[in-house]
Amino acid sequence: MCKGLPGVRYIRLTLPTSQGAKLNLGIEAARGEIIQKLDDDDFYAPKFLATSVEHLPKRPGTVVTRCCFLILLRNSPVVRHSGHGWKPGGAFCFHRALWRRQPFRDADRSTDSLFLQDHNPLIVRICDVEQYMVVRHGRNTLQAVNTEGRAQEVDELFARRPEYGKPLSQLVPRNDLRFYRSLFRWRDRHTV
């Protein structure tokens, strides 16, 4: 989707590589001093990047993320609200200097949690739910979270979250709508 766009560097790996190592390769290849982590399967509204940078203090020991977000679960057209108090890794924005101190660990799971653990940064959470939507398609890396002192399966937890009140068609640009609606029929086309 980004290959061939001006200013985009496309890196193709030929060997299996951990999620943490891929993040580090991408950051090494980036040119800027501000890093915005984006997950390829999530939705980011047009003002997402500008809002992240506006909230990022000059202090390199800070990570900006979101307090709340929208959720789209496969096989369901209902958009849900996450509730408040989150710090999703798919929305991390930070100074390259923070990453230089300690890059992402060479791990396939929990890379975002480990990054926070390694840095213990000041966390700035933006509460603007329509800027970020987590898309759960069945093959996401995050499968369980610890809430209320116990591990819970993520999709089951998210399925219990309240409906947001706006349909997907009012949240996603028209040219992207077909892709996100295709998730409703995921089970019909793929083995789960």
Image: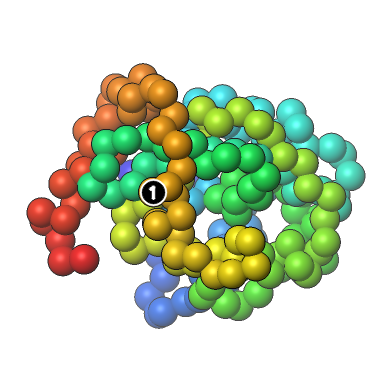
Q: Residue furthest top?
A: 170
Q: Label 1 amino acid?
A: Ala
Most foreground residue, 15 or 38: 38
Q: Residue at x 22, y 33 (%)?
A: 178
- For the C terminus, the quadrant is bottom left
Is there any visible trace of residue 10 in the rendered image? no
Q: Give the vertical position of 74 relative to 131 (above or below).
A: below
The correct choice, above or below, for 160 with respect to 28 in the image is above
Q: In the displayed structure, would residue 101 be above or below residue 91?
A: below
The residue positioned farthest toward the left in the image shown: 188
Q: Position of residue 129 (x, y in %)?
A: 55, 31
Q: Position of residue 130 (x, y in %)?
A: 51, 28
- Decide which of 102, 5 is in the foreground and name it: 102
- Name the residue located 39 percent from the left edge and 48 percent from the top edge: 159
Image quadrant in which you'd find residue 119: bottom right
Residue at 76 percent of width and 32 percent of height: 55
Tell me the residue at 74%/62% (across/down): 116
Q: Position of residue 109 (x, y in %)?
A: 53, 72
Residue 182 drawn at (x, y percent): 20, 42
Q: Disc 1 on helix, strand or loop?
A: helix
Instruction: Report the residue marked by disc 1.
Output: 159
